[in-house]
Image (tube, helix red, strand yellow):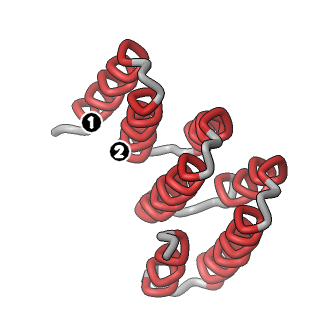
Amino acid sequence: MSPLPLLLPLLTLVSVQQNPDWEEIRHIAESQHEILLLLIEKKEFEKIPKVAGEIFRLPFPPDQEHLVVKEVEILTDALLHHNQLGLAHRILDDALKCLKTNRSRAQIHREKAYVFKKEGKNDEAMAEFEKSVALEKADEP
């Protein structure tokens, strides 16, 4: 079973003062997630960056960016299973441009490192791990 459906319960269970804006954002993200699932199933990989970008550009509250990171991790894993390494890099780079918190950005750099490692590009992987550590340290009190 694919890990992709795991994001929906995360989005559904989130409670952020239940303001209408957050509810709308959450519903849009859920629908876009389902579109991504179908695109992967149909192997229409060329359409994935546009749809994923629509999720990344939603105005998630900073304390909910972890949901975007989880989506990126799930999507990257699915792309790697379909041997879409270049597309995985593109998705990770696109997500980095949209995330605001150091913690979220650190997690994406760590994910980038794992993709490079899978490709056997250890120098690039190490550089991404170092970026991740630097961002995590920047968040320390």
- Say which residue appears at 50% left-offset and 59% top-offset: 74
Residue 24, x across and y down, in percent: 69, 80
State the image quarter where residue 33 is shown. Answer: bottom right
Q: Residue furthest top?
A: 123
Q: Position of residue 121 (x, y in %)?
A: 43, 18
Please tell me how crowded label 2 is: few (under 14), some (14-19), or many (20+) other residues with Cα within 10 Å: many
- Give the camera-side residue of 13 and 49: 49
From the viewer's perspective, is 79 left or right of 125?
right
> Helix or strand or loop: what does disc 2 sit on?
helix
For this view, does 72 lie left or right of residue 106?
right
Where is residue 110? Give x, y as percent.
37, 37
123 relative position to 57: left or right: left
Q: Quadrant of residue 37?
A: bottom right
- Mark 2–mark 1 Cα distance, whole angstroms, equals 6 Å
Task: Name the residue at 52% across, 87% down.
Answer: 18
- Relative to 108, say whether 52 is above or below: below
117 left or right, relative to 31: left
Comes first in the chain, label 2 or label 1: 2
Q: Is the residue 96 above or below the residue 73 in the image?
A: above
- Residue, x 36% and y 24% (percent of image)? 131
Mark 2 is on which residue type?
Answer: Arg
**Which residue is disc 1 drawn over?**
136
